[in-house]
Every structure is written in C-alpha cells, then in structure tokens.
Image (tube, rainbow, N blue to C red):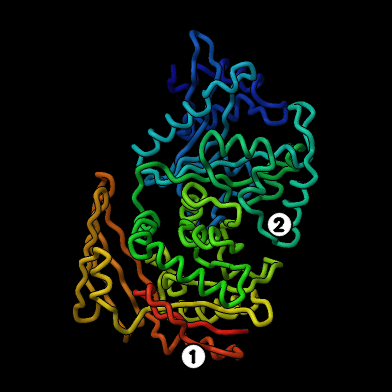
Amino acid sequence: MITQLHEGNIEEILDLEKGSFIPQLQAEKSTILKRLGLGHSILGNYEGNDLVAMVSYLYTNFNPRDPSTFPKTHKDFSLQPIPENPNAVVIISLGIKPERRARGLAQELLKAVGEEAKKHGCLYGVADGRCPSYNGSPQEDIKQNPEFKNIIGQYLNKGIVPSQEDFLKDPLLAFYHRTSGCGFLDVIPDFFPEDEPSGGLRVILYKYLDKIISLSKEWSILARIMYGQEYIEQLADFLIQSGVETVLECGCGDGYISKGLAERGLKVTALDSDPEMVYLAFNNSVHPNVDYKLMNWLDLDKLAEKFDCVICRGNSISSVSSWGKEEEYNPNIARERIKKSIGVFFRRLKDNGMLYVDTTKESLDIDAIRKLGVDIAETGGGIEFEVKREDFHLKGKIEHDLARRTRRTYGRGTLEGEEFSVSSTSYLMTPGELEGIIRSHNPSEIWIPNLPHERYYHVICAMK
C-alpha cells in the first residue's frame, strides 16, 4: 500500500534510512523534519504494517536545457523551498529494504510520484544519481570500475562528453535508468563529499513525464511525415558516394535520420542540446552505429574526434539560440551564434571533409509537398499547413518577417487524443546569407547538391 508519510512516521522513516543506505548517506532526524517543514513529500510503500520502501521528493523549477540551474551541493538540492508554479519534481532519495529489492517497488513509487507531479503541472522528473563504481563500495558489494572512472575523469578534466551508454557502466546508474527510463544530463563534482564510493560526484538524471506533447515531440512526429525512407536513402547514397564514413549530426532530434544513416553502414555521432530529443532518441532510434550525446554544438571543441562529414539539417542552425526559448530570441544574437556554429562545424571536419547545412528555401514545391499528404498553401509572408493522420492532427502556420530576420511557427492539434499547442521562433536566414557565412571560412569548394527528396530546405555543401 502506497501512502503519504508525515512527522508522525518519523521513527519508521529513520529505521528505513538505516536499512536502505550506507551510514554516510543516511539523513538525520532534524534534516527529514526540516524537509517536511519546507513542504517536501515522502511516499511510503507498506507490506502489512511494515514500511519497506519510500521516496522523498519536492517540487521546483528547473530548466533541463541549462544544467547550470541545477544546485551544486546536496544540501542546496535537498533543502529547496517549494515555488508557486513548479515545473519539475525532484527525487531526493529512494530507499528500499535490501530484502525487498527487485520486486518492482521502486517502479511503483516512482510511478505514483509522477502521477502526483503531473497534477501539479510538472513537466520533468529530476534526480541526483550516485555512481559508486567510481571508487567502489565494499559495503554495497560494488567493485571499482576503472573504465567508468576514467570516462568521468575525461569529462571533468578535458570536457570529453560521455555517451549515455558510458553512464550505464555504473550499476546504480543502470538501475536508475532501468527503473525510471531516465536519461543522464550532467556530472557535478563535490556534490556530496561524504559519498566516498561515488567520489563525491553526482550525475543529474532527468525524465520527461508522460503525456506531455511538447515542441520536441510534435517535431519528431512531423519529421517522419516530412522525410520518408526515400530521403534517407538518397542522403545516405550521397554521403557514401562522397567517400563519407563518419558523420557528426548536429541537432539530431529524436535520431530518426541518424538511425537511418547508421542502417546504411555510416558511423554516426548524433548530438542535440534538447534533453527531450535525446531522451526520445534513446527510446526510439537506438542503433549500434549511433552514439547519441546530450550536447550543445557550440561546445563541439570539447570533442577530440574529427569527422568526414558534419551535418546540420532540418533548418536546425536557425534555431541555435531559440529552440524552446521564445522569450530569449534576439535576431542579432542568433546571427552571431550561427556564424560561430559554422566555424565550430569546420573545426570538427577532417581535411577534405564535407559540411552539409540547410536553411529556408526561397520558394517551396507546393505540389510535391501535397503529394506527401500535407495540405499546404502559401500566404503573404509565409505558409499555412495541415497534417492529418490516424492518431495525429496538426494545423499551423509559418510566418516570415525578412526585415526583422524572424521566422515564427505556430501549431495546434491532437496526438493520441491529447490536445496540444506549440510555437517556436528562429532566425530567418536566406540561402545567400548562409552561403556568405560559409564562404568566409574559405572552403576549397562549395556547391548545392542534387537531392530531389529534400523538398523543404535549401542545402549547401562545402569542402574543408
């Protein structure tokens, strides 16, 4: 039986703390009472009269696109006050009696927390994850994993970003992922110094709560309608015929295209700065030839590897400063970040490597798009469109303001019976402007490839 715990349960809570956690991780009575006084919650799972599992949590505001908003110490993390309009539920601790583990109790409690969080309007689940194989923990019968420790050290010392699979090398992080479906956002050093097995480190865990129809999810569905298998085959053929073996896709979204290229034998490193996109990729587009990374491409200099081809497609480059951040959009800042992006892309190319970037077309092939089942019409300064599928209906418009260099997209519809409304703002970049930025990096060659199945955007390729 799952029920809310309160001050009257404090002795049971303390007993379970002692039975669930190594001594240095056990919360003191005063700390637990302080958390409850701040409005934090504890859900307990009883078997008869025996408290066998519990989860402590709170509501807060958190921006998963900016991990720097995450508290830097466990004390700050676990003693946060509750804001008026929270957007995230934070898991402080999850304790289960050792003899009751592997019975699905963690999943039951986390599911209950998620349902409560959605009632409060929360979009995300967030937690700090231990990684005891960093130093090893004899008390927990966990050996040190030198490979895992080296991976984390490479990130902290050299900025080499771990893949999601790298994090799974730690058994406790793997457990978190298995029980909650979470992804891994960042590593914080000196977060909990007393946790010697984890080296004081914590890994930020995140999860998007179910039934959230966001811009990312809507776009991932729309991308499959816009780009069929024939486009993927054509793009893969073009890359292979150009001598490409390794690809870096910047702004990979949910991995739909990355996986398609990998299935043709290309080795793909795919990154996106949107945690939900990477979360969707790990759930929908896993392939042994694809390494997904949660990373802003402006930080690409942290990667040591260079590639035969860098791809930034789907007009992603125009959203470099504004995806999911409409209030922050500034066309002057956007253009500077686009220019910086092109420079970063070239630095990640091998000699004679190829850059593939696209932007908005000056005119669309309306008839070709309609053949894909998209009802589309050009209007003064933009287009209106409608897409209908069995479980997806989207009606929207795209407005272009060339004077202000602004492209606004609006959409409303239903997905699996759930209503949604999304919008985004990006930089309106002409093909000529993009070509000028690329030419400023003195490529040895620049050209427009022949890709008839790319019906939406103007592609420009350049050779380093």
Task: Name the kind of residue labelled 2 in the image.
Answer: Tyr
The residue under the point 75% across, 59% down is 157
Q: Mark 2 sits on what residue?
A: 155
Q: CA distance from mark 2 to mark 1?
A: 35 Å
**Which quarter of the image is occupied by the N terminus?**
top left
The residue under the point 48% across, 44% down is 207
Residue 264 left/right relative to 229: right
Q: Is residue 63 above or below residue 36?
A: below
Q: Is residue 113 above or below residue 400?
A: above
Return the disc, 2 or 1, that comes first in the chain's sequence.
2
Image location (x, y in percent) of residue 28: 64, 26
Image location (x, y in percent) of residue 376: 21, 70
Which-is-in-front pick, marks 2 and 1?
1
The residue under the point 63% across, 28% down is 27
- In the rendered structure, are the residues bearing label 2 and label 1 in contact, judged by CB atoms less than 8 Å apart? no
Residue 303 left/right relative to 316: right
Could you say which is closer to the camera, residue 356 or residue 424? Answer: 356
Could you say which is closer to the camera, residue 5 or residue 432? Answer: 432
Image location (x, y in percent) of residue 269: 60, 62
Q: Give neighbour class at mark 1: few <14, some 14-19, many 20+ (Cα, 10 Å).
A: few
Q: Mark 1 sits on what residue?
A: 436
**Which quarter of the image is occupied by the C terminus?**
bottom right
Task: Name the kind of residue labelled 1 in the image.
Answer: Gly
Could you say which is closer to the camera, residue 355 or residue 129? Answer: 355
Q: Is residue 444 above or below residue 305?
A: below
Image location (x, y in percent) of residue 119: 34, 37
Toward the top, the furthest residue is 48
As helix, strand or loop, the secondary structure at mark 2 comes to helix
Residue 55 left/right relative to 421: right
As helix, strand or loop, the secondary structure at mark 1 comes to helix
